[in-house]
Image: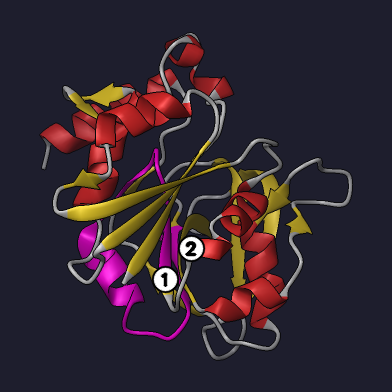
Amino acid sequence: MQDVILAAGLGTRMRPLTNTVAKSLVKIAGRPLLEYTFDALPDEVDEVIIVIGYLGEQIRAYLGDMFRGRCIKYVVQNKLEGTAKALWEAKPFLKGRFVVLMADDIYGKEDIEKCLQHEQSMLVYRQKRESPGGEVVLNKKGELAEVLEKNSIPIGALVATNVYVLTPAFFQYEPVKKHPDSPEYGLPQTVVEMSQDHPVFVVEATRWLKITTPEDLILAEKSLNLG
């Protein structure tokens, strides 16, 4: 099975750490974030396609063409227009159903394995503290209905983690902007568009450490030390 890891972003909110280091190579507890991403990959994954951009050669140099027994391929997102456009860059390499993860968040392997139990699915997390992101709305069947970009998602609401199990049907739908005035095309919004014809089951995560700012690195390290 193939996995796509999105690792092209500038990591603007992680500066100054990302002035000279790709965000996915910033370290927590002595290990690059990207290693935690590989920790979360299901055993079924035997090939990883990494979408690189800003300081992407650092990622290529670190992982090489084979990492932890998995074949690695690279594709460059030259114009950074959001996660939906990033995934489209990987389209020529994809052969069937696949997993999508971000390169710079920390996920639980068991949660992603649960996602694989459904033809198409997305991983969500129940908010424990208010923060910006994409609030996920479900339909009566517990499937994806809508993702609302908000500056503050309340405690207890569901938020998109940007982990998906998708089929090639995704590429039948043009990338959708995060909101009408946004320069970025969002993966959650595009998956919502697809879900109107191809249902997307929603799996609630038991673990998700969102890494956006240097402060998040400190919180994540404390969480990891607690086990």
* Three-letter amino acid code at the position of disc 1: Phe
Left or right: 82 in relation to 106? right
Q: Is residue 59 magenta?
A: no
Per the model, the C-alpha gap separating discs 1 and 2 is 11 Å
Residue named by callout 1: 98
For the N terminus, the quadrant is bottom left
Image x and y of residue 46, in percent: 24, 64
Residue at the spot x=55%, y=22% of the render? 13
> In the structure shown, which secondary structural element does the residue marked by tag 2 occupy?
helix
Residue 81, quarter of picture: top right
> In the structure shown, which secondary structural element does the residue marked by tag 1 occupy?
strand
Q: Determine which of the numbered discs, if any, sits on residue 93 in the image.
A: 2
Q: Is residue 122 magenta?
A: yes
* Three-letter amino acid code at the position of disc 2: Phe
Residue at the spot x=52%, y=56% of the render? 159
For the C terminus, the quadrant is top left
Q: Earlier in the sequence, mark 1 or mark 2?
A: 2
**Is residue 42 placed above or below 133 in the rendered structure?**
below
What is the span of residues highlighted in magenta in the rendered image? Answer: 99-125
Left or right: 122 in relation to 1? right
CB under 8 Å between discs 1 and 2: no
Image x and y of residue 171, in percent: 65, 72
From this viewpoint, is residue 208 visible? yes
Mark 1: few, some, or many residues within 10 Å (few <14, many ≥20)? many
